[in-house]
Image (cartoon, rainbow, N blue to C red):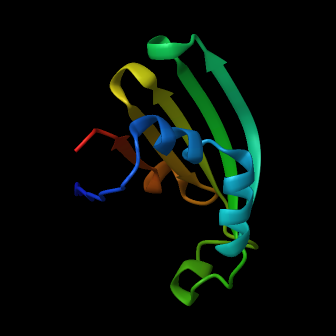
Amino acid sequence: MQYTITDDFDTSIQHYWDVYFDDAYNAELYKRLRIGREVLEVRKEGEGDSLVVRRKVRLTPQREVPGIVSKFVKGALVYTEDNVFTARTNTLDVVTTPGFMADKLTTRGTYRVQAL
């Protein structure tokens, strides 16, 4: 299945990515969403237009697992997000892998930021 979601933000491209990667912002965001967040890896390569940031995060929603999902999940629902940000294209490639049935349920997407 493929789909597109479009959002408009009244901010610059640089500010958007600065906030997206800000640790304090993310800590508070995930706290309010009641999702445990553990940063497993952050690697920055290059700078300016040639900057590439690779980030791996383990996320654990702090809620009860829905009944239908509980048949497949033992314990907490956990998933891992692998992100690769490329400054030259203002894109973030995301691969989300659940802690269960990973061979069947991996999702992929691309965030693309452009000026209006």
**Residue 112 position (above or below residue 71):** above
1 or 30, which lies in front?
A: 30
Residue 110, how many percent across, how many down? 36, 41
Question: Position of 82 compared to 37: left or right?
Answer: left
**Residue 50 position (above or below residue 27):** above
Q: Residue at coordinates 40% horizontally, 41% vertically from top-left?
A: 12
**Residue 67 position (above or below residue 8):** below
* Quadrant in the picture for the N terminus: bottom left
Please say whether residue 34 is visible from this viewpoint. Answer: no
Q: Residue at coordinates 63% horizontally, 81% vertically from top-left?
A: 65
- Quadrant of residue 87 within the rendered picture: top left
Q: Residue at coordinates 59% horizontally, 28% vertically from top-left?
A: 54
The residue sitting at the bottom extreme is 67
Question: Position of 93 compared to 64: left or right?
Answer: left
72 or 84, which lies in front?
A: 84
Q: Residue at coordinates 30% horizontally, 57% vertically from top-left?
A: 8
Residue 111, how many percent across, how many down? 37, 44
Question: Position of 90 compared to 18: left or right?
Answer: left
Residue 70, how many percent across, how many down? 62, 81
* Quadrant in the picture for the C terminus: top left
